[in-house]
Image (tube, rainbow, N blue to C red):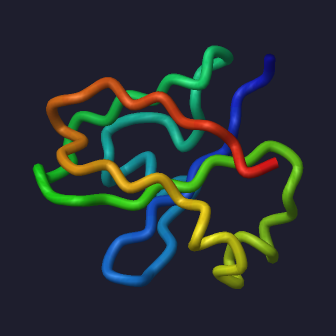
């Protein structure tokens, strides 16, 4: 299994890549088991979207928002994500 890319949806804005890694004090992708750990997120709902084969333009367009995983309190949990593809 290969790592999945991540996008966080925060206040309606997509945050991914270097920006997500900076905000979360983490990586912008999952590990090979689909696990992602963040260290700097507030304990409030966060939408996360994981993908492997979808183009960045499709992710940025918001076409997959409905498939995002909502995490109630990310700072206290280990997050396991399923990819949209």
Residue 33 to residue 69: above or below:
above
Total numbered badges shown on the rendered structure: 0
State left or right for residue 82 relative to residue 22: right
Q: Which of the two residues, 29 or 19, is positioned nearer the viewer here?
A: 29
Residue at 18% across, 45% down: 73
Which quarter of the picture shows residue 61?
Answer: bottom right
Residue at 15% across, 31% down: 76
Which quarter of the picture shows residue 77?
Answer: top left
Q: Quadrant of the N terminus?
A: top right
Give the image location of residue 30, x and y in percent: 58, 30
Which quarter of the picture shows residue 8?
Answer: bottom left
Residue 10 to residue 13: above or below:
above
Give the image location of residue 83, x and y in percent: 69, 42
Residue at 58% across, 49% down: 6
Give the image location of residue 53, x and y in percent: 88, 48
State left or right for residue 85 relative to residue 8: right
Residue 50 to residue 16: above or below:
above
Give the image location of residue 40, x and y in percent: 20, 43
Residue farthest to the left? Answer: 43
Q: Which of the two residues, 16 or 32, is positioned nearer the viewer here?
A: 32
């Amino acid at each position: 299994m290969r790592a999945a890319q991540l996008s966080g949806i925060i206040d309606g804005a997509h945050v991914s890549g270097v920006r997500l890694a900076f905000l979360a004090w983490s990586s912008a992708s999952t590990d090979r088991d689909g696990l992602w750990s963040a260290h700097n997120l507030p304990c409030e709902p966060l939408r996360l979207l994981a993908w492997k084969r979808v183009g960045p333009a499709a992710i940025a367009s918001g076409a997959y928002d409905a498939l995002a995983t909502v995490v109630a309190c990310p700072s206290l949990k280990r997050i396991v994500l399923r990819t949209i593809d």
